[in-house]
Image (cartoon, rainbow, N blue to C red):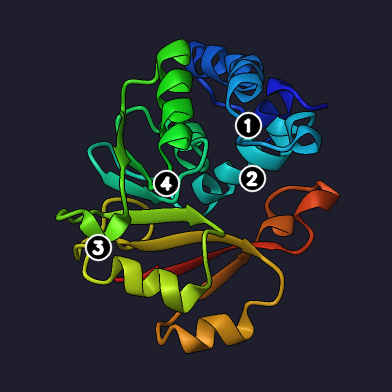
Amino acid sequence: MDSVALIERYFDNLTEEQHRQFAMLGEVYAEWNAKINVISRKDMEQVYLHHILHSLAIAKVCRFEDGAKVLDVGCGGGFPSVPLAIMFPNVQFVACDSIGKKIRVVEGVCEAVGIKNIRTVNGRVEQLKEQFDYIVSRAVTDMPTFVGWVRGMVRKGQQGTLPNGILYLKGGDLTEELRQSRRKWVRHNIAELFDEEFFETKQVVYSAE
């Protein structure tokens, strides 16, 4: 069931526009991936499971309020920011990546699907002189390095169901990485949110500012 039906299984209150956009993502990513390879062929066959639903685990852990500002660090082809931008159409997302071709994919997908709430930045995150309510990312580097990149970029407050902070998607044994990052983390096992075996070792780790 690698289709929009997989998303609807866990998010049953989608608007017609959200359904339309999620339904388009598979085909649009396939078209862009044929031009600029950002997703492996194996993963492309299960893009809804491996990328779209995986990204939306963050939405199960924290619901962002309208008007919140969220940064996706090392966004790649747009994960987790593209699915999250569809889920939260009144939240402003900034998708940042140092590799220009990946940013072109994000921009192309957003244009094709009609996503208006993502601004792209082609550059290193350390160059951004902004603050955000939440920072999201998916396994771009080890946790101590990541924390160093984004230090001081989360403003205090609460623009969602959790206090402002970092929400990071990663798998495996994170005990030592999280300890070395010198922050307090809360782990959410994605297998407790979604039934699929793919998520067995994957987590959303959260740290409040």
Is residue 5 toward the left or the right of residue 158 in the image?
right
Mark 2 to mark 3 CA distance (whole Å): 23 Å
Q: Which residue is mark 1?
A: 37
Which secondary structure, mark 4?
loop
In this rendering, the answer to whether 18 lies above or below 94 is above
Mark 4 to mark 1 CA distance (whole Å): 31 Å
Mark 2 to mark 4 CA distance (whole Å): 15 Å
Going from the N terminus, do you reach mark 1 or mark 2 first?
1
Going from the N terminus, do you reach mark 2 or mark 3 first?
2
Amino acid type, callout 4 = Arg
Q: Are marks 2 and 3 in contact (CB under 8 Å)?
A: no
Q: Percent x, y for residue 104?
A: 42, 27
Residue sitting at 22 percent across and 56 percent down?
Answer: 127
Label disc, if present, on residue 63 of the rendered structure: 4
Residue sitting at 37 percent across and 60 percent down?
Answer: 162
Is residue 34 toward the left or the right of residue 22 in the image?
right
Q: Which residue is mark 3?
A: 154
Mark nearest the camera among 3 and 4 is: 3
Mark 3 to mark 4 CA distance (whole Å): 17 Å
The quarter of the picture where the C terminus appears is bottom left
Circle 3 residues within 10 Å: few <14, some 14–19, many ≥20: many
Q: Which residue is mark 2?
A: 54
Q: Percent x, y for residue 44?
A: 73, 31
